[in-house]
Amino acid sequence: MRRQEEGSFFGNLDWITIGMYLLLVLMGWGNIYAAVYDEEHSSIFDLSQRYGKQMIFIACALVIALAIIIIDASFFTATAYYIFGAMVFLNLLVIFVGKDVKGSHSWFKFGDFGVQPAEFIKFAIGLALAKLMSDVGVKKNEASNMLKAFAFMVVPLLIIMVFQNETGAAIVIVSFIGIFYREGMIPGIVFVAGLLPAACAIIGIKYDYHETTIPFIVIGVVAAGGLLTLLFIRRTFWNIVIVGSAICLLAVFTLFTRKVVDILPSHQTGRIKVWLDYKEKLDTVDMKHREEQIKEIQERENKYGYNVKQSTIAIGSGGFTGKGYLEGTQTKFNFVPEQETDFIFCTVGEEWGFLGTSGVILLFAFFIIRIITMAERQRSDFSRIYGYGVAGIFLFHIIVNVGMTVGLVPVIGIPLPFFSYGGSSLWAFTILLFVFIRLDAERLNILR
Amino acid sequence: MIAPFSERRYGVIAVVVLVALAYIGRLYYVQMVNDTYKLSARNQAFVFKTDYPPRGAIYDRNGKLLVFNQVAYDLMCVPRDMKGMDTLELCKILNIDKDEFIKRMIRMCGNLKNAKYDYRTYIFEAQVLPELNARIQEKLYKFNGFFVQPRTVRKYPMPVAAHLLGYIGEVDERGMKKNPYYKSGDYIGVSGIEKGYEEYLRGTKGVSIKMRDVHNNIKGSFKDGIYDTAAVPGLSLVSTLDAELQQYGEKLMQNKIGGLVAIEPSTGEILALITSPTYDPNLLVGRDLRKHYVDLLHDTIGNPLFNRALQAYYPPGSTFKLMNALIGQQEHVLTASTMYPCARGYPPLGGKPKCHPHGSPTDLKGSIAHSCNSYYSYVFKSIVENRKYKNSVEGFEAWRNYVLSFGVGRKIGTDLPFELKGNVPSVNYYNKVFGKGGWRASTVISLGIGQAELGVTPLQMCNITCIIANRGYYYTPHIVRSIGDDKEPLTKWREKHYTEVTDPLAYANVVDGMWQVVEAGTARVAQIPGIEVCGKTGTAQNPHGKDHSVFVCFAPRNNPKIAIAVLVENAGTGASWAAPISSLMIEKYLNGKITRPDLEKRMLEGNLINGKNAPDKPDNH
């Protein structure tokens, strides 16, 4: 092992990424200030206000970042499983000792300060998966390893979703799919093919087969496509079975996703229906029933569509250049709910306009691409795999969070990295990122 | 050595780029293309508060206040916000029942179902006076969706000149379309000076933009008020009206139907403009405007809303002889010494038009003094059949042009709205009635004595009198002298309008004749000790019953200060009512007191509407 010269250690840190991190954190702080701005407490350092608290969170985050940089990189590779185990334990513990907040036991409370362990499981899963897949002599595609990797994701998912009732935090686990793709464990065709059932599901939900013939047309098209495919591939027994069962599966999918949606918890059903602008077919005979139906639809849209409607109004009202810093009316005057946490992007949209929103999107895009580029320059498989996990988590958060504020994605309560108010999410993202930066700083010391 | 599958990085990067582009595209649509979000934000977060300026006051020529503003309040409502209000309590305070409440809601929103979503602001109860407002304010916290908007209501300290001053009312759909300045619930001048000088009186509304939060709490001014505008108060007007004279005239005209116009000839300023019957201007104000308006509208006998002085066409009768005397002299077919016979009528047409007994033959002055019908039939014929013109049609055309130059048969351009043209029959008209070439001077001979199809408003009669008083010109009659702080009369009123009759001698002869009318002629009743009054009686035949009593006059003879035209409908001869009323008006205006109490009493008490009128004096045109 070649020793690095003293002093050049900091030179090995990726300052571009750190710079982007600091920029995003400061932008987030400024927008939290604007979102909850209150003339009586106009100082951004006022600790009684959320922007004052966010400042403390940021300070703590910087301390955490520094600590991670000081720690030897081999610590993370050596203890990956232990960290994962500890995080799973904390997530189990919180179910029993956690405070009940709106029906979910997911917060450790220390006075009026809370920590959500679900936020911290993400980097732990990343470490565990990296460790598993990078172990020398491990064949990634072996069934037992696949099963292990699967367990690393599904166990926390179940704990968080079922016991903590935090669907948003749980489905983030989907973001690790990037690792499996990059490591060659899933063929690319799966993603392309995956679009088909997704489209079928959406059509199946939006156009109830009881009410329109559209789902049946879709099934017809799919079946025709499948039969055409059979003409071009070798018609072996197994191929016919695969194509046939795929068609059947899609048919079932198309026809019954609505049923699945209907058995979800009512707020999720509502959010999905509002997202797809689904409206029940109105009774044309029984006028009384018809009125009830209309009332039901209106109530649903008021209840589950309100957030998205208000957030879209706030963003849309920003126009090209925005209303100016602290001049927003929709977020500042509480028209947008959760405007400093999950819906913080509305403040960006309203006060900084299209220039601001596209700027933030581009900045995040560069940030994620930077992480991918860094992952690719790693000599160690562990660092690369972990890096892809980091990129996937950031990408997923941005897709879902920004998407829901403009109605592209149903409302799922997950934060916008570095922007949303809150200590847990900021620290979790900081740890996630800086572990990777620490690993990256060590890249030249790794011998293949 | 390159890790396996490393080319897959490009797939992942492509996903990142595609997501970024898709999201930027969506944001482009939401923020740049679709405007509905901006509109929604505006509706949600902004409250546009209108500040109403006080309307300008109106003064009379002596500085007496005619119209001012009293504080009143409009009870406004926003139906969407009414949920949970105490309907019963509000009905009790306003003294209405629940049906009326629902009726109003339906009138505002179309139907009750809409009310829940209707965020527009309506006037629920207009112009509530301070006492009632205090009671509403006390309970306002119970009336969700209601608020009180301070406004002003017009007040008239002297209940005179209702038609002249006009009134204001809520602007209607048409008014809003015509001028986008007006918004639902605004007030606008509907008639009289209020309408004619609307743009000066109303001032300019101010707007302040407030911001509100999701709970409808006001959070201060938008951008510290840089877009707010202050209300600019309306300008006050100085009217030419003499309020005391107007009041006196209204008293003299009470219980009579007709019109009276008094103008200062040397300026064209209208001193009094009276329509009888009239009404108290305080009726068409505030909450009960609509009710009172309907009551007045239903009085079909007196028809008090009809402005007779400005809008009623009357045949001028004998007063029109002055016009023909002037035209004849200008056309050199008549001199002061021209004599015509009278045989209790016009001899060439077998005694028609008829005349009354007086000395015959008579000269020009005598013809005016005794109002000889025969004389003016000769005069009219000589004008129309003047050899100067090819034929009598051309002669008639020339006569008509003279008449038009006196402001009859066309609008004279006063500042009062709804002025009418009057009617002077044209060649085309007679061609239609009698056929081309089917008529001559003798066919239309009654034009010579102011009958036939002639239609003249009292205002026009008075203007003709001004022209004679001024010996040849008039200033456009007007009711507003100056606007705002500018005490100078408006320049457009300073222009002299000359008539086609330019011969000073013609005027001198006619004025002498008019003086004779009062000194020794048909209107001796109009004599005032110490004042030389010049006048002319008229007894206008009309298809509606008894003759109209008409009198035009000016005084003093030299340097006239006032010209008056009076018409009392179906009252008999000019000397019976119109002349004494004119005379009393002149005395009141010039001397300030009345020396003939008996005459005054008879005029004040005369009731021609309910048939209790004093008996006519003997016929003496």
Image (cartoon, rainbow, N blue to C red):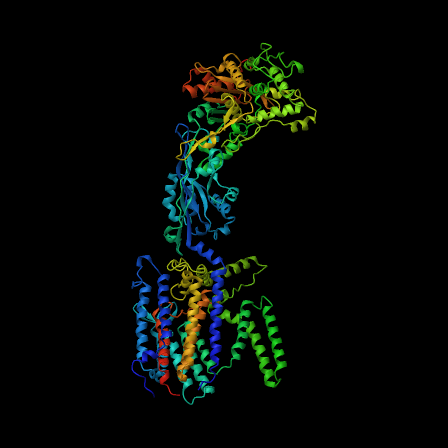
Residue B464 or residue B419, whichever sits in front: B464
User: Quick check: B471 above or below B356?
Assistant: below
Q: Quadrant of the N terminus of chain B?
A: bottom left
User: Quick check: B156 above or below A321?
Assistant: above
User: Quick check: B524 above or below B217?
Assistant: above
Q: Is residue A185 visible?
A: yes
Q: Is residue B574 visible?
A: no
Q: On the picture, is B347 further left or further right than A382?
A: right
User: Quick check: B293 above or below A192?
Assistant: above
Q: On the picture, is B390 further left or further right than A274?
A: right
Total labels drawn = 0
Q: Quadrant of the C terminus of chain B?
A: top right
Q: List x then y, in percent, for residue B603.
A: 48, 19
Q: List x then y, in percent, for residue B299.
A: 53, 30
Q: On the picture, is B428 further left or further right than B129?
A: right
Residue B375 or residue B543, whichever sits in front: B375
